[in-house]
Amino acid sequence: MKVLVLTGAGISAESGISTFRGSDGLWEGHKPQEVATPEAFADNPALVHRFYNDRRRQIQQATVRPNAAHQALALLETALGEDFLLVTQNVDNLHQRAGNSRVIAMHGELLKVRCNETGEIFDWHEDLTEGTPHPNNPLIQKSLRPHIVWFGETPFYLPQIEDAARQADVFISVGTSGTVYPAAGILSQTQSHCRTIEINPFPTPLSPKFDETIRQKASIAVPIVTQQIQDQSIIRG
Ligand code: NAD
């Protein structure tokens, strides 16, 4: 039984990381177009760097840890192996920290930076500024940017994600608003035999299209659903 899981900011809300759209429609006090577009980075790189430096510092605070939902998905991967794939829109690395390795971070990762000139990707835990030197070539200047997919840019690994959606027997969407495309389009790439489940305390525009919607927090619902899948896959052998 092939299981594809899509996660969004909601799964990390109970780990203390704000979702994208708070009740004020802002992301940590900013309009998304001020901080999460290539145009914003070109216009005001200092502001964009400061925003992502704050986000990078936040996810490294001792209080920010994987919660029961992340942990349950790590256990499901252990049980299913190659039949499991996790696609996340999150950039916080909490899935990797929980123990998942079959993770596609389609919107990038806060703990990585990329060189605009060479395309190299570096692990990164510190602040980044316009003046931060390239790690191994001092002749390249002002080339580093957060390894984050901004609005207007193409997410990573879309062909692999589409393949996984077509092959999935179970598709679970956790903590995502269903409004950020192409992630929101993954549901429509699943086939008719695939059982589709949404976990979100609140309805989303996609809710009517799922076979089942579970109106619960991720930390409650994900451990239950993943246990059910493990029980079924044991019965099926
Ligand atoms: P979103 O903020 O648009 O939507 C979050 C969804 O989670 C909402 O539908 C909300 O009802 C739901 N939710 C809130 N608390 C929940 C809980 N405890 N359990 C389950 N669901 C809960 O997020 P999105 O759809 O992921 O899109 C946001 C974009 O912003 C993504 O592209 C992502 O890259 C980025 N982002 C990432 C993080 C992160 O890495 N943690 C945080 C904020 C934004």
Image: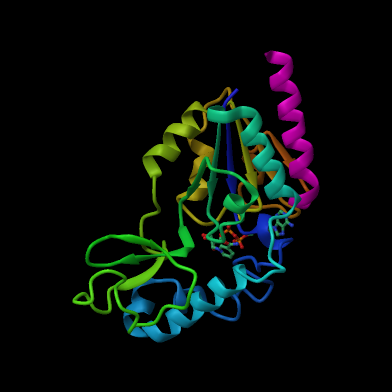
Question: Is residue 229 one of those drawn in magenta?
Answer: yes
Q: Residue at x 69, y 72 (%)?
A: 23
**Among the 4 quarters of the image, the one containing residue 118:** bottom left
Q: Residue at x 60, y 69 (%)?
A: 60
Q: Residue at x 71, y 28 (%)?
A: 229
Q: Is residue 38 above or below residue 160?
A: below
- Foreground: 122 or 229? 122
Q: Is residue 31 above or below residue 228?
A: below
Q: Quadrant of the C terminus?
A: top right
Residue 50 visible: yes
Q: Residue furthest front?
A: 136
Q: Is residue 14 above or below residue 73?
A: below
Q: Position of residue 124 (x, y in %)?
A: 45, 67
**Among the 4 quarters of the image, the one containing residue 134:** bottom left
- Foreground: 223 or 34? 223
Q: Quadrant of the N terminus?
A: top right
Q: Quadrant of ligand 1?
A: bottom right
Q: Position of residue 75 (x, y in %)?
A: 69, 38
Q: Main secondary structure of the magenta part?
A: helix
Q: Residue furthest left?
A: 139
Tally the marks. 0
Region of the chain picked out in magenta, as a range:
217-237
**Among the 4 quarters of the image, the one containing residue 223:** top right
Q: Is residue 20 above or below residue 181?
A: below
Q: Position of residue 107 (x, y in %)?
A: 46, 57
Q: Look at the image and name its color scheme.
A: rainbow
Q: Position of residue 141 (x, y in %)?
A: 24, 78
- Foreground: 226 or 159? 226
Residue 196 visible: no
Q: Is residue 105 left or right of residue 119?
A: right
Question: Is residue 111 one of those drawn in magenta?
Answer: no
Q: Is residue 65 left or right of residue 220?
A: left
